Amino acid sequence: MNQATNFRNDLQGAGALMIGGAHDAVSAKIVESTGFDGIWLSSMGACVAGKALPDISLFTLTDMLNLAQNVVAVVNLPVIVDCESGYGDEKNVRYLVKQFERIGVAAVCIEDNPYPKRNSFYMTGRSVLPVDAMLAKLESGLAARESDAFLVVARTEALIAGLGVKEALSRARKYRDIGADAVVVHSRDWPALKLFLEEWDGGAPLVVIPTLFPQVSFNEMSSAGFKVVIYANQAIRAAISSMQTVLRRIKAECGANGIDLLENVASLEEIEKIVCLEEWLPDAN
Ligand code: SPV
Ligand code: MG
């Protein structure tokens, strides 16, 4: 069974799915080995890790396609690709759906940020695409699928743009009605999402990204009505702080000769396990 079908089946199951954000192939493998239900290929993580640049559409469709190819080659979990605002208009969305479906990811997510987009947590210059333009993108993406199993996930930034719960509901309903397979309601805070859930009339699984409200537990989000919880950028943030800690210590202590450094870095054996060295080079050790 392909990953899109697996992900669809998982969405039908009881309980919510816990998805981990990845920014490269190795972080995707770690998300998988940790027991998450799927992988979110994060635009922010990919742009930061791959280019050390801000998440403002500088990581291109081609960059993301190459990255996704490397990821699907080494994991067996459904991969949801964060395709931002679709890298253009509905023609770009048509093209990207064909490309990402072909390489074996389970889903793409398209948000109603205008293109070029800015990460949801950059505070200034917020706006959303006119709803008809977003619907044209979704329609075009849904029609471009080879198989009905492939998922096109819609994401509304209405709350992020300060447009309120009513606008978020109106957009989410329109995205659901046009056929989006799930709807991400992105928010800076949990209370707005609780108000959203009070009015939501179902019909598509809802997705939450709790980046700015880490105090709300998975169980609380799940029992409130979210079917998917995405921990989008914790891995890249952990990687950055871990690299800073270790490298600062090496620099400060004039070398990596302190044995307690080993507590903070993966062993070479651990890396060999992750990259399946034994499979590739049985006589390596
Ligand atoms: C990403 O991971 O790129 C996202 C989620 O879009 S967030 O950065 O939390 O907005
Ligand atoms: Mg993103």
Image: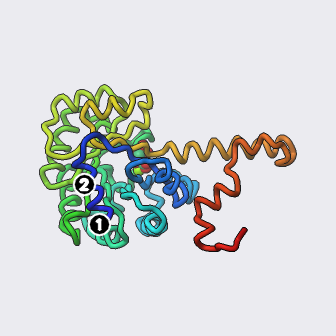
Question: In percent of the image, x 25 and y 58: which residue is there?
Answer: 152
Q: Is mark 2 within 8 Å of ligand 1?
A: no
Q: Is residue 173 left or right of residue 101?
A: left
Q: Secondary structure at mark 1?
A: loop
Tell me the number on the disc at residue 9: 2
Instruction: Say which amino acid is labelled 2.
Output: Asn
Q: Position of residue 203 (x, y in %)?
A: 14, 45
Whether residue 118 can be seen here: no
Q: Quadrant of the C terminus?
A: bottom right
Between the residue at mark 2 and the residue at mark 1, the CA separation in whole angstroms equals 11 Å
Neighbours of disc 1 within 10 Å: few (<14), some (14-19), many (20+): few
| Residue 79 drawn above or below residue 191 | below
Q: How is the image coloured?
A: rainbow
| Residue 206 drawn above or below residue 69 | above
Front-most of 249 and 61?
Answer: 249
Q: Position of residue 27 (x, y in %)?
A: 53, 54
Question: In percent of the image, x 43 and y 55: which residue is there?
Answer: 41
Instruction: Say which amino acid is labelled 1.
Output: Met
Q: Is residue 42 left or right of residue 240?
A: left
Q: Quadrant of the N terminus?
A: bottom left
Q: Position of residue 37 (x, y in %)?
A: 38, 49
Front-most of 184 and 262?
Answer: 262
Q: Secondary structure at mark 2?
A: helix
Give residue 69's quadrant in the image: bottom left
Tell me the number on the disc at residue 1: 1
| Mark 2 / mark 1, whichever is N-terminal | 1
For the residues labelled 2 and 1, say whether their Cβ atoms are less than 8 Å apart: yes
Question: In percent of the image, x 74 and y 45: which residue is there?
Answer: 262
